[in-house]
């Protein structure tokens, strides 16, 4: 997502095409308006994601459905789909809200409610009705589709007309990853005492513990694992995300090879161990 993509501009073009199709006043051309409006909504969602590019997990880059993408953004910031107004003012004393605030404008964003109620519904007009729908379903209601398209076009137009956009304000904690050195930045939602953070470049993950007074502690998610050679005392730290069957490393002490694997633990008398089993001799991993 690092290339300069102007999704807002693209969205504007799709909106214009949709309006052209709607103004043709032909039921036959409504499906083209529906398609253009869906694309306009996709562009707006991608544009919103670009506003969170430092926090958006690269593993989600393939996501194209706006609803799934917005769900990821809402996980990052619960306010990601809320309209907002930005205002500035000079505090008379530190911490005391300014008596007069100057508004810089408001932003209207494509929210989850809008996506849920319209995006999929438009999609149903973009396919030929199935055999079952043709037999049992009501015929296509073009009047309803036109009203829906017009409502979406108005909404998208308002979003695109926002004088300010992609405002993401928040409290952030920063750390240079202990494993790979990549700078990490994580939003700290108001009131949260512990926040999980994953490095996007390596397997490191952390819990950020908010200690108050602007101080945070990054606790690495690591396990100490000893060399499996009974004659060797060497230990290494493994990130929790690396704890997978087949992960291997060469021991720095004895230079042998260690491989993580699944194990079976045998208990001679299962009842004494507090567990009961009706399958004698059965082992389970
Ligand atoms: Zn890292
Ligand atoms: Zn060893």
Image (cartoon, rainbow, N blue to C red):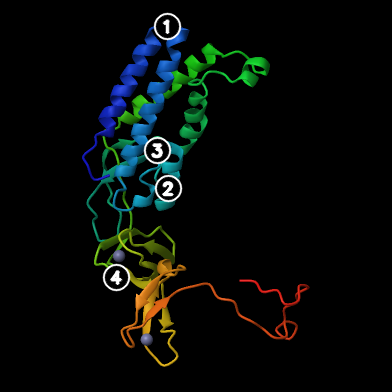
Tag 1, which secondary structure?
loop
N-terminal-most mark, 1 or 3: 1
Q: Which residue is mark 1?
A: 25
Dot 2 crowding, Cα within 10 Å, few <14, some 14–19, many 20+ = some
Q: Position of residue 85 (x, y in %)?
A: 33, 40
Instruction: Tell me the quadrant of the picture where the C terminus can be found.
Output: bottom right
Q: Position of residue 11 (x, y in %)?
A: 31, 28
225 up-or-down from 233: above or below: above
Question: Looking at this rendering, what residue extends furthest in the bottom direction?
Answer: 231
Contact between marks 4 and 1 (CB within 8 A): the answer is no
Q: Position of residue 278 (x, y in %)?
A: 78, 73
Check mark 1 vs ligand 1: CB closer than 8 Å? yes or no: no
What whole-number distance in Å separates the C-alpha atoms at marks 1 and 3? Answer: 31 Å
Task: In this rendered view, identify the residue nearer to me: 23 or 163.
Answer: 23
For the point 32% across and 36% down, the residue is: 106
For the point 34% across and 34% down, the residue is: 44
Task: In this rendered view, identify the residue nearer to me: 260 or 174.
Answer: 260
Dot 4 crowding, Cα within 10 Å, few <14, some 14–19, many 20+ = some
N-terminal-most mark, 3 or 2: 3
Where residue 64 is drawn, which disc sits there? 3
What whole-number distance in Å separates the C-alpha atoms at marks 3 and 4? Answer: 31 Å
111 up-or-down from 217: above or below: above
Q: Which residue is mark 4?
A: 179
In terms of image quarters, where does ligand 1 lie? bottom left
Q: Which residue is mark 2?
A: 72
N-terminal-most mark, 3 or 4: 3
224 up-or-down from 197: above or below: below
Tag 3, which secondary structure?
loop
Dot 1 crowding, Cα within 10 Å, few <14, some 14–19, many 20+ = few
């Amino acid at each position: 997502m690092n290339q300069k993509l102007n999704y807002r501009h693209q969205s504007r073009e799709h909106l214009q095409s949709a309006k052209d199709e709607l103004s043709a006043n032909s039921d036959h051309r409504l499906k083209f308006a529906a398609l253009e409006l869906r694309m306009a909504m996709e562009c707006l969602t991608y544009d919103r994601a670009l506003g969170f590019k430092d926090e958006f997990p690269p593993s989600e880059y393939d996501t194209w459905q706006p609803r799934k993408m917005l769900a990821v953004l809402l996980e990052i910031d619960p306010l990601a789909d809320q309209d907002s107004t930005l205002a500035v003012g000079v505090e008379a004393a530190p911490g005391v809200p300014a008596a007069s605030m100057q508004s810089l404008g408001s932003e209207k964003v494509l929210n989850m409610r809008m996506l849920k109620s319209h995006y999929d519904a438009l999609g149903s007009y973009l396919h030929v009705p199935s055999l079952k729908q043709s037999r049992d379903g009501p015929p296509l209601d073009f009047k309803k589709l036109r009203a829906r398209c017009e409502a979406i076009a108005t909404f998208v137009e308002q979003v695109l007309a926002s004088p300010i956009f992609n405002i993401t304000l928040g409290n952030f904690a920063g750390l240079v990853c202990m494993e790979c050195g990549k700078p990490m930045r994580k939003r700290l939602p108001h009131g949260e005492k512990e926040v999980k953070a994953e490095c996007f470049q390596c397997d490191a993950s952390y819990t950020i513990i908010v200690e108050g007074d602007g101080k945070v502690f990054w606790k690495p998610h690591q396990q100490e694992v000893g060399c499996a050679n009974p004659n060797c005392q060497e230990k290494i730290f493994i990130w929790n995300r690396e704890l997978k069957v087949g992960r291997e490393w060469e021991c720095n002490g004895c230079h042998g090879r260690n491989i993580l694997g699944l194990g079976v633990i045998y208990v001679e008398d299962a009842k004494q161990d507090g567990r009961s089993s009706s399958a004698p001799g059965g082992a389970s991993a």
